[in-house]
Image (tube, rainbow, N blue to C red):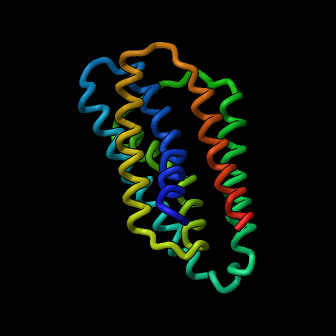
C-alpha cells in the first residue's frame, strides 16, 4: 500500500475522532486547550495502537488467509465505508458528555476499532506497520484538535457530509485493492 493510500486511510480513520472532538468542543467552553489536548492524545494514541494489534494478530494467521487477501481487504474497507455512510444518516441521540479518564479511554477505544481492521489490511498488503501507525496517530491527533477547536467556534456544521466523504474514501480504497 502506497503512502498516499496510507494517508487517505489515516484521514478517513481520523474522522470519527474529529467528530467526537467536535461535539466536545461544542459543549466545553472552559479549559479548551486542556480538554482538546486530552481528547487528541487519547484518540491519537489508540488510533496508533490498534492497527499494530490488528497487524500482528493477522500475522499469526497469515498463511491461512493470504490467498484471500485482496478479497478480505476489499470487504473490510467496503464494510467500513458503508458503515460510515449509514451512520451519517442515522439520527444521533442527545448524549451527556464526560471527559474523565474512564470516558477518554472509552472514546479512544470506540473511535479506533476501525483502525484495528486497518492493521489487518496493512498486514495483508505486507506493509510495515510502524510508519503507517505513526501517520494514523498523528493525523488523528491533528484532526481531533481541529475538530475540538471547530466545535468551540461553530455551532452548526453538517457533519453528515464529512462522514459520507470518509466512507467513500474507504470504499475507493477497497475497490482499488480488489483491482490489483
Q: Quadrant of residue 94?
A: top right
Residue furthest top in the image? 155
Q: Which residue lies at the image location 70% right of the left edge and 79% below the top edge?
A: 65
Q: Which residue lies at the image location 73% right of the left edge and 59% below the top edge?
A: 75
Tell me if residue 179 comes above or below residue 102 in the rendering: below
| Between 8 and 63, the one nearer to me in the picture | 8
At which x and y percent is residue 30?
26, 19
Tell me if residue 154 comes above or below residue 35 in the rendering: above
Quadrant of the snapshot with the C terminus: bottom right
Tell me if residue 141 comes above or below residue 132 in the rendering: above
Q: Which residue lies at the image location 73% right of the left edge and 80% below the top edge?
A: 67
Q: Which residue lies at the image location 51% right of the left edge and 14% below the top edge?
A: 156
At which x and y percent is residue 153?
37, 16
Quadrant of the snapshot with the N terminus: bottom right
Tell me if residue 20 comes above or below residue 108 in the rendering: above
At which x and y percent is residue 123?
56, 72
> Number of marks in the image?
0
Give the left or right position of residue 160, taking residue 105 as reference: right
Give the left or right position of residue 22, taking residue 179 as reference: left
Q: Quadrant of residue 48?
A: bottom left
Give the left or right position of residue 10, taking residue 177 as reference: left
Give the left or right position of residue 50, taking residue 137 as reference: right
At which x and y percent is residue 13?
52, 47
Amino acid at each position: 500500500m502506497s503512502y498516499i493510500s496510507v494517508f487517505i486511510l489515516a484521514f478517513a480513520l481520523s474522522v470519527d475522532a474529529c467528530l467526537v472532538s467536535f461535539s466536545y468542543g461544542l459543549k466545553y467552553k472552559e479549559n479548551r486547550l486542556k480538554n482538546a489536548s486530552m481528547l487528541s492524545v487519547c484518540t491519537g494514541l489508540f488510533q496508533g495502537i490498534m492497527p499494530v494489534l490488528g497487524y500482528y494478530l493477522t500475522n499469526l494467521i497469515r498463511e491461512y488467509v493470504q490467498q484471500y487477501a485482496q478479497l478480505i481487504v476489499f470487504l473490510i474497507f467496503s464494510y467500513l465505508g458503508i458503515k460510515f455512510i449509514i451512520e451519517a444518516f442515522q439520527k444521533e441521540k442527545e448524549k451527556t458528555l464526560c471527559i474523565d479518564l474512564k470516558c477518554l479511554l472509552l472514546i479512544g477505544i470506540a473511535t479506533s476499532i476501525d483502525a484495528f481492521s486497518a492493521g489487518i489490511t496493512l498486514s495483508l498488503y505486507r506493509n510495515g506497520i510502524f510508519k503507517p501507525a505513526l501517520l494514523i496517530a498523528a493525523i488523528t491527533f491533528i484532526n481531533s484538535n481541529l475538530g475540538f477547536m471547530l466545535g468551540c467556534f461553530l455551532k452548526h456544521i453538517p457533519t453528515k457530509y464529512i462522514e459520507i466523504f470518509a466512507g467513500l474514501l474507504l470504499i475507493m480504497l477497497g475497490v482499488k485493492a480488489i483491482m490489483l
